[in-house]
Image (cartoon, rainbow, N blue to C red):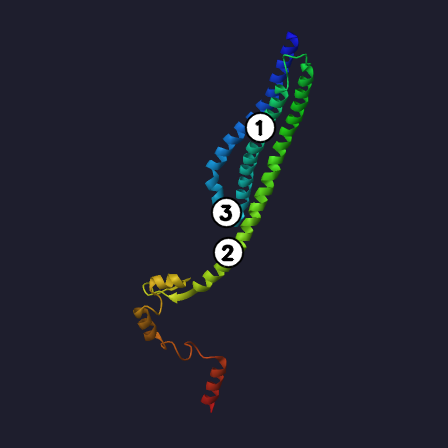
Amino acid sequence: MAFGDYFNAVIIALATGIIAIPAGGMIVVAKAALVIMLGIGPMFVMCLMFPATQRYFDSWLGQVMTYIFRIALMATVLSLAIVIFNNLVSAVDLESDQNTLYTSLLLIGATVVLARLLDEMNTVSGQLAGGMSLATLTFGRMVAGATSPLRVAGNTINRQSTRRDMQSGMMVTGGRLNHLAAGNTMWNPAYRQHVMQNMGKNWGPAAGGKTSKERDQRQWIDLA
């Protein structure tokens, strides 16, 4: 009887270790890696500013979601294992003539199933994270499409134009708000006066030499 009790204790210890040690190790590693990934997260968020580097943010987000799902799924499997082990062990009555070998065999079977479940949840966490990152990328495209009318309206209001700068005298190209801030607008009395003074100064025929037709007419007039 004592040998049977020791045998059952060894089986319970091994079953608990086979489930708890790998799952606990995965959770600890995933939490440490998650802290590191979140620490360097701002660098990948900045990659969203440029279309050529947006894929780096998607890869970073997928890895972060993998660790999050792994922690959640491993904790769920551990909670399930604790419930199963408690139900099996609490059903043992040491005061009766019950054969505890049957309970030990049930523990071995539950350990095999839970170990397979741990491996499956490890794979599922990566698959869920991949789908989540893809959905986030699609959502980002939807947001970009939704904000495109706003960009069109902004370009209409702040339309690009070329005007002469009052200070440098050079032609500058900029938005309407930029010209307004620089005073290069008809709302500025000095700029309006400058435009009125120069208006018509360059009107008339273009400066330069005569065309071949005009030269021929001039030669015929001279010969006549």
Q: Is residue 60 left or right of residue 113?
A: left
Q: Earlier in the sequence, mark 3 or mark 2?
A: 3
Determine the CA span between mark 3 and mark 1.
38 Å
Q: What x and y, as percent, mark residue 216?
A: 49, 84
The residue type indicated by label 3 comes to: Leu
Please, is residue 59 above or below residue 180 in the view?
Answer: above
Q: Earlier in the sequence, mark 3 or mark 1?
A: 3
Q: Quadrant of residue 185?
A: bottom left
Q: Secondary structure at mark 2?
A: helix
Q: Residue at x 60, y 35 (%)?
A: 125
Q: Residue at x 48, y 33 (%)?
A: 35
> How crowded is the residue under tag 3: few (<14 C-alpha within 10 Å), some, or many (20+)?
some
Please, is residue 191 above or below residue 126 in the view?
Answer: below
Q: Secondary structure at mark 3?
A: helix
Residue indicated by mark 1: 79
Q: Is residue 28 left or right of residue 99?
A: left
Q: What x and y, as percent, mark residue 75?
A: 56, 30
Residue indicated by mark 2: 147
Say whether residue 138 is visible: yes
The residue type indicated by label 1 comes to: Ser
> How crowded is the residue under tag 1: few (<14 C-alpha within 10 Å), some, or many (20+)?
few
Quadrant holding the N terminus: top right
Q: Is residue 73 left or right of residue 102?
A: left
